């Protein structure tokens, strides 16, 4: 009797954690969605591990596409030491995707992940077919190097009020923003088994230093890129100022820009009901 094919996993809460060895690093990753030649690889934010992706967005994309999330070197369950530059993180990402046998990918990136994705696209033309860049900005963008100051202040506020730092960093502090923050954090806790390893304080500090270097460095020339691009953010992002999304939009020819009202760095999570299907449709176009 022929064996039955394994059922397709389309819920991020059920995606098993796997490992892959590449460039001397054991990368932790998860995979879900139907098989396909070109997967969507998710690039996560500062101090984030596999459990920090909003399942409403991942599941929307995975309904029709193969999705891969992964921990960068030194983050979560991946081995090694966190790289101190965004360029090095991009090369780690390249090692990971090529070790999977991939020669072309689509990308969904948030915050620092968008910075890594940009360096990956510049260093390896032709690898990225389509991408969604959210809550992020370009290399050398105005005030990009001040992300660390905002982050440290909000982490302190969260500690003093016994809240998750993402509630303050990602959302406005009015009644609407607080409600969206509470719902977002609750969604991140829906996975109850096989949780990822917490990100260390040392890894967090090294990533902040890498972002500061990225912000102080000379801008990358993104004008040659012909990648179909969707850029999204909230209209009051204090972490990576919203004007940087507009700057990125100007630098990438033909890109689309979506700015959500009355929202901050986590605007895409506050407005996930609109954004999740929009991003999924864009990536599958």
Image (cartoon, rainbow, N blue to C red):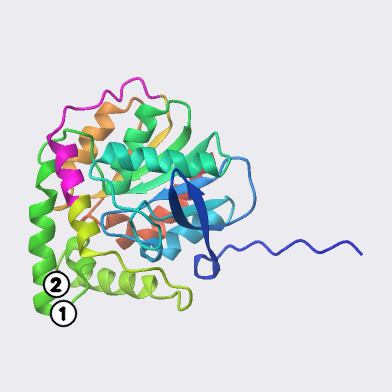
- Whether residue 242 is in magenta: the answer is no
**Which element type, helix, strand or loop, lies under badge 1?**
loop
> Range of the magenta residues?
208-225
What's the residue at 43%, 47% (across, down)?
24
Label 1 crowd (10 A; few <14 / some 14-19 / many >=20): few
198 versus 128 height, above or below: below
Question: 39 or 2: which is nearer to us?
Answer: 2
Q: CA distance from mark 2 to mark 1?
A: 6 Å
Q: Which residue is mark 1?
A: 162
Which residue extends farthest front?
A: 24
**Which element type, helix, strand or loop, lies under badge 2?**
helix
What's the residue at 14%, 43% (across, down)?
212
What's the residue at 18%, 48% (across, down)?
240
Give the percent coordinates (x, y) of residue 42: 43, 50
68 horizontally vs 257: left or right: right
* Residue 263 in view of the camera: no
Question: 81 or 257: which is nearer to us?
Answer: 81
Q: Are marks 2 and 1 in contact (CB under 8 Å)?
A: yes
| Residue 158 image label | 2
Question: 181 or 47: which is nearer to us?
Answer: 47
* Residue 183 in view of the camera: yes
Give the percent coordinates (x, y) of residue 12: 50, 65
What's the residue at 16%, 33% (across, down)?
140
Give the percent coordinates (x, y) of residue 255: 35, 32
278 versus 156 height, above or below: above
């Amino acid at each position: 009797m022929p064996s039955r094919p394994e059922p397709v996993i389309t819920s991020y809460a059920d995606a098993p954690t796997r490992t892959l060895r590449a460039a001397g690093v054991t990368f932790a990753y998860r995979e879900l969605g139907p098989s396909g030649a070109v997967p969507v690889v998710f690039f996560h934010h500062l101090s984030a591990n596999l459990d920090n992706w909003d399942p409403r967005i991942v599941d929307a994309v995975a309904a029709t596409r193969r999705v891969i999330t992964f921990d960068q070197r030194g983050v979560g369950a991946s081995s090694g030491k966190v790289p101190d530059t965004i360029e090095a993180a991009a090369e780690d990402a390249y090692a990971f995707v090529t070790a999977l046998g991939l020669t072309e990918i689509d990308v969904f990136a948030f915050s620092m992940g968008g910075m890594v994705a940009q360096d990956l696209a510049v260093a390896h033309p032709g690898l990225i077919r389509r991408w969604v860049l959210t809550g992020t900005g370009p290399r050398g963008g105005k005030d990009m190097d001040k992300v660390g100051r905002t982050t440290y202040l909000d982490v302190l506020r969260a500690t003093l009020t016994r809240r998750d730092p993402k509630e303050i960093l990602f959302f406005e502090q009015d009644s609407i923003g607080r409600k969206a923050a509470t719902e977002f954090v609750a969604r991140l806790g829906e996975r109850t088994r096989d949780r990822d390893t917490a990100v260390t304080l040392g890894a967090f500090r090294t990533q902040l230093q890498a972002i500061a270097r990225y912000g102080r460095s000379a801008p990358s020339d993104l004008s040659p890129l012909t990648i179909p691009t969707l850029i999204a953010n909230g209209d009051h992002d204090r972490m990576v100022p919203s004007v940087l999304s507009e700057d990125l939009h100007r630098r990438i020819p033909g890109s689309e820009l979506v700015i959500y009202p009355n929202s901050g760095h986590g605007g895409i999570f506050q407005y996930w009901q609109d954004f999740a299907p929009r991003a999924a449709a864009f990536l599958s176009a």
